[in-house]
Amino acid sequence: MENTIFTRRSIRRFLGKPVESEKLDRILKAGMQAPSAHNGQPWEFLVITEQNIKDAVSKMSPWAGMVAKAPVTIIVLGNIDTPNVRWIQQDLSACTQNILLQIAEEGLGGCWMGFYPDEERVKKCSEYFNLPKNIIPFSLIALGYSDDENRYVDRSNISKIHFNKY
């Protein structure tokens, strides 16, 4: 199974090598190709490459330490002024997953960390970046080159599949 869906892994260790802007552009465009309720496209992105900012973000969650060592961090933001906002978690999850798949497709490693709905993480991020009230930090994605590789691990479990009734 060589398909990116099957080989993508959560990569948490990164090399110091910078990520090419062409790759980063494709990664962000992949996020924007995600489906969204009524095509609301509620996503926006903060792309972080400056070390002092990555250091600050790495302290906003107990699981975000890897951000300090990642060449790039993307914060997926959600605009709650979007029509059909009640589906925003699904829309932003699809966006985040598309980004992760494109990261692997580009030969890079990446890891998704949640911010929303953890109120403390959302507050820290919103205050640090002075986000408008209608913008919520949803997910955090550390990415870059790594010696760790995306590889297939069979996670299938037939007992979780139900046809026509539970």
Image (spheres, grey):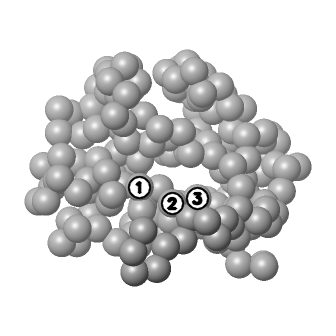
Q: Which residue is mark 1?
A: 93
Of helix, strand and loop, which one carries label 2?
A: helix
Q: Along the polypeptide, which appears first: circle 3 or circle 1?
A: 1
- Whether residue 161 is situated above or below residue 97 in the rendered picture: below
Q: Nearer the viewer, residue 41 or 38?
A: 38
**Which residue does the image show at 32% across and 60% down from the upper left?**
91
Pointer 2 with pointer 1, Cβ within 8 A = yes
Mark 1, other Cα within 10 Å: few <14 / some 14–19 / many ≥20: some
Which amino acid is tagged 3? Answer: Leu
Residue 94 percent location from the top left of the image? 42, 62
**C-alpha gap between disc 3 and disc 1:** 11 Å
Residue type beneath disc 2 = Gln
* Viewer can see residue 103: yes
> Is 136 displayed left or right of 84 in the figure?
right
Please state if 73 lies on the left or on the right of 43 as rendered.
right
Secondary structure of residue under mark 1: helix
Q: Is residue 60 left or right of residue 33?
A: right
Q: Check the picture and name the quadrant holding the C terminus.
A: bottom left
Q: Which label is found at residue 97? A: 2
Residue at figure coordinates x 78%, y 79% from the top left: 1
The residue wearing badge 3 is: 100
